[in-house]
Image (cartoon, rainbow, N blue to C red):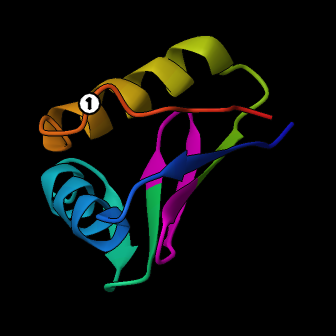
């Protein structure tokens, strides 16, 4: 079950890069200014920066706590986006 949120922000690339660097010390991370993939034990987090939004996609493992996964990602993004937090996550 994949879940995706479109998070409105004009700082998508900055947040994507900050979060990717932050987690690169703990997890396998591949990223550039526009896309990121982070391999968590609970599944993959993919992010894509657009001009006016950050697309956040979670691919949880079957045993993952999806609500917790969403919360961890949202909390960390809000920390980096403190000037405009809380960000709006419309998970689908």
Q: Position of residue 79 (x, y in %)?
A: 17, 32
At a point 66% along the width and 20% down the height, the residue shown is 66
* 60 displayed left or right of 68: right
Magenta residue span: 39-55
Above or below residue 85? Residue 64 is: above
**Magenta segment, prevailing SS (helix, strand or loop):** strand
At a point 71% along the width and 34% down the height, the residue shown is 61
At a point 20% along the width and 47% down the height, the residue shown is 26
In the image, residue 23 lies in the stretch drawn in magenta: no
- Say whether residue 84 is visible: yes
- Say whether residue 65 is visible: no
At a point 43% along the width and 58% down the height, the residue shown is 38
* 60 displayed left or right of 77: right
Which residue is at the front of the view, 52 or 38?
Answer: 52
The residue pinned by badge 1 equals: 85
* 67 displayed left or right of 50: right
In the image, residue 50 lies in the stretch drawn in magenta: yes
Q: Position of residue 44 (x, y in %)?
A: 57, 51
* 64 displayed left or right of 37: right
Which corner quadrant holds the N terminus? top right
Which corner quadrant holds the C terminus? top right
Above or below residue 27? Residue 82 is: above
Which residue is at the front of the view, 65 or 67?
Answer: 67
Secondary structure category for the residue under label 1: loop
């Amino acid at each position: 079950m994949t879940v995706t949120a479109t998070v409105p922000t004009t700082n998508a690339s900055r947040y994507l890069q900050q979060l990717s660097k932050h987690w690169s010390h703990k997890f396998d991370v591949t990223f550039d200014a526009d896309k990121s993939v982070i391999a968590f034990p609970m599944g993959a987090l993919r992010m894509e920066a657009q001009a006016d939004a950050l697309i956040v996609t979670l691919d949880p493992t079957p045993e993952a706590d999806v609500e917790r996964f969403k919360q961890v990602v949202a909390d960390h993004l809000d920390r980096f986006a403190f000037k405009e937090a809380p960000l709006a996550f419309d998970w689908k």
